[in-house]
Structure formats: C-alpha cells, structure tokens
C-alpha cells in the first residue's frame, strides 16, 4: 500500500468541476487511533478561488478505552462533514475571529497541498465522544480494590454507597487506636 502520510492533493490538480476521492480499507492512521474496522468513505472537493469547499463521509470502527472501567470497547463511526479549507498564510487574528463567530468548520492547507491523511485523522478525532463509556451505565472500577464492577462484585461494594470516609473509619477501628 502507498504511504498514507503522502496521501493528498495539490490545489492545481483539482479540476474546475471538482474532484471526488473515494477511499477504503484504511486501517493505519498512527498510534493514537486503534482501528478495528478499516475506514472507508469519500472526499468531494471544489475550488472557489483560494478556498476549497470539502464535503466528506467516513465510516469505520475504532477501539476506545472506557473512562470509567478502563476496558477497551468498540466504537462505530459514521460521520459526514463539511469544511472550508483556506490557505494557512491567509490566517490572521481578525479572520479567525470572524470565522469562529460564524461557527464554520475550517481547516487549512499549506503550500497548496491538502493532506487527506491529516483531514481523515482530524475528522475521526472530531467524531469521538467527549466522554468515553463502554456502556451508558458502566459501573466502573471499585475505588478500593480496583475490581471491574461490570463483571464482578467485590466485598468493598457496600462502602460505595457510604461516604468515602466509611472505609477510613473501618481501617481505624480495625487498628483499635
Ligand atoms: Zn466501562
Ligand atoms: Zn472493591
């Protein structure tokens, strides 16, 4: 397979009628993304002066780690997006402000090169949940013994309902100070 990092298009190679790039079977986007089912989708690009309008779609499955129980779980992604891609050189503070006010999704290109590799990674990260949970009611790990409470019950369970100090009390009474 070709080197994904060099996957992209030069501005001058986008014809006036626009360009559609389809992709499939992308399973390696670097260490930050654990891909379970390879990504497929498309980018549609249209040039408007120095600006490029992009519409895209991507689909795949990644493996995330649950914030509560730290177990890996599968997270399917189906994501459509629209972007305005501007030359990085055009970026100044005033414009940035204007853009964020309009809440447009904006990306930038450098040296007339649009990197599909970076775009794809960016859009996958944008479609990940803010809170990563293996299931909505994940019980998490026991704060005392570390047992995964989705799978097992531990003896410390009763303390969970009490204040976190209950266990301290118990420890102290054991010592019989
Ligand atoms: Zn979990
Ligand atoms: Zn426990």
Image (cartoon, rainbow, N blue to C red):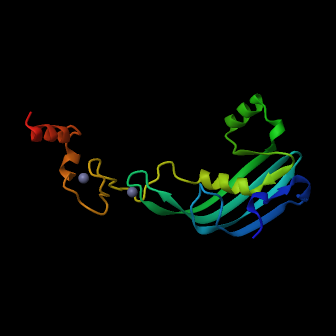
Q: Residue furthest top?
A: 94
Q: Is residue 12 left or right of residue 23?
A: right
Quarter of the image containing the N terminus?
bottom right
Q: Residue at x 83, y 55 (%)?
A: 46
> Which residue is found at the position 31% from the left and 53% from the top?
146
Q: Position of residue 154 (x, y in %)?
A: 22, 57
- Which residue is outermost to the left? 176
Query: Up-down: is 91 above or below 129?
Result: above
Answer with the quarter of the image where residue 81 lies. Answer: bottom right
Q: How many marks?
A: 0
Residue at the location (60% across, 52% down)?
125
Query: Residue 13's x, y, as percent?
Result: 90, 58
Q: Nearer the viewer, residue 70 or 173?
A: 173
Q: Position of residue 43 (x, y in %)?
A: 75, 61
Quadrant location of the C terminus?
Answer: top left
Tell me what residue is drawn at x 55 percent, y 53 percent. 128
Q: Is residue 17 left or right of residue 79?
A: right
Q: Position of residue 19 (x, y in %)?
A: 84, 62
């Amino acid at each position: 397979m070709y080197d994904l990092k060099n996957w992209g298009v030069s501005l001058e190679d986008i014809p006036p009628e626009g360009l559609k790039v389809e992709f499939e079977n992308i399973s390696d986007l670097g260490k930050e993304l654990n891909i379970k089912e390879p990504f497929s989708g498309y980018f549609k690009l249209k040039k408007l002066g120095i600006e490029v309008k992009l519409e895209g779609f991507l689909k795949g499955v990644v493996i995330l780690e649950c914030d509560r129980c730290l177990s890996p779980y599968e997270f399917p992604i189906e994501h459509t997006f629209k972007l305005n891609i501007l030359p990085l050189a055009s970026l100044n503070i005033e414009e940035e402000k204007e853009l964020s006010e309009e809440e447009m999704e904006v990306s930038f290109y450098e040296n007339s090169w649009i990197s599909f590799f970076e775009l794809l990674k960016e859009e996958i990260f944008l479609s990940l949940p803010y809170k990563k949970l293996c299931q909505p009611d994940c019980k998490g790990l026991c704060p005392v013994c570390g047992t995964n409470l989705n799978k097992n019950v531990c003896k410390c369970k009763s303390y969970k309902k009490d204040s976190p100090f209950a266990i301290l009390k118990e420890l102290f009474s054991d010592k019989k100070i």
